[in-house]
Image: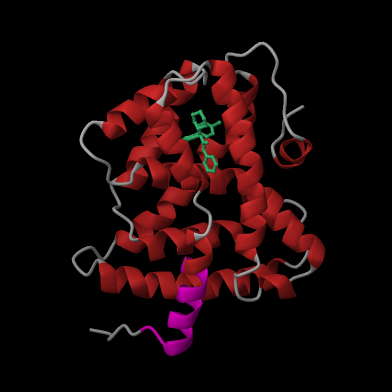
Amino acid sequence: KEKVEITKEQQALVKVVVEAYNRHQIPQDVAKKLLQDQYSAEENFLLLTEMATSQVQVLVEFTKNIPGFLSLDREDQIALLKGSAVEAMFLRSAQVFSKKMPNGHTEVLEERIRKSGISEEFMTPMFNFYKSIGELHMVEEEQALLTTITILTPDRPYVKDQQAVERLQETILDVLRKMCVLQHPQDPQYFARLLGRLTELRTLSHYHAEMLTSWRVNDHKFTPLLCEIWDVQ
Ligand SMILES: O=C(Nc1ccccc1)[C@H](C1CCCCC1)n1c(-c2ccc(Cl)cc2)nc2cc(F)c(F)cc21
């Protein structure tokens, strides 16, 4: 049985990534707001566009802490951010949704999201994904590293030097694999299941533009940054 060991530099890498990851708390605040009050579809749409806009800004800050990211070609850095922003938002939403909350809070949160203005057809795929993330009971290191792996996806549109991205992603995959073995010794398939969620995440993210344009509001106004990042307007 191979002895799995996380090296000193891998520990340092995880520490940097987790600390950077914990700095972006936005959706926690959204969850709190949603639990406090019931908002109209207009208010929810505005809340989402504001939150999603600041999430992109926070994502840029987060990537600066991914070892090696700033050494990538500048245009490739933009392509990776552009290509992963929506997935990172849904992954973050899923992680907030699956956080342990006092009794009944998750049900209220789910209800508020169901009534937020998103059209019915997207509810099932969205909540199926949120619940499948919840079932994994990820620790925060796994959450941070999974988000990092999503950002470092080599085959995003317009990435020129895919090998350079692949090398960075492999570094993160290696430490995540070891962490999963150490964290979930009873479940040898855990790492594979974790990566399998990224496929579900990509599928859900395909709907994002429709989810926004079909939001039950009269006027769908987006910020310039969201028009850049999300395929809207
Ligand atoms: O804000 C959000 N997500 C966010 C995440 C990361 C960073 C910034 C924002 C929105 C809310 C939803 C209800 C109306 C207000 C915005 N949000 C979503 C969500 C995002 C995009 C689309 Cl198209 C559909 C749903 N799923 C959520 C799960 C949660 F537990 C949750 F708490 C907030 C959630």
Quadrant assignment for the C terminus? top right
- Residue 155 showing in the rendered view: no
Q: In the displayed structure, would residue 108 be above or below residue 7?
A: above
Q: Is residue 192 left or right of residue 212?
A: left
Residue 10 % position (x, y)? 46, 82
Q: Is 145 or 154 nearer to us in this picture?
A: 145
Residue 12 included in the magenta stretch of the image: yes
Q: Residue at x 27, y 42 (%)?
A: 101
Residue 7 % position (x, y)? 41, 87
Q: Residue furthest top?
A: 218
Quadrant assignment for the N terminus? bottom left
Q: In the displayed structure, would residue 71 be above or below residue 141?
A: below
Q: Which residues are magenta?
A: 6-18
- Residue 193 showing in the rendered view: yes
Magenta segment's dominant SS is helix
Residue 71 % position (x, y)? 73, 75
Residue 26 included in the magenta stretch of the image: no
Q: Residue at x 46, y 75 (%)?
A: 15
| Residue 105 found in image quarter | top left
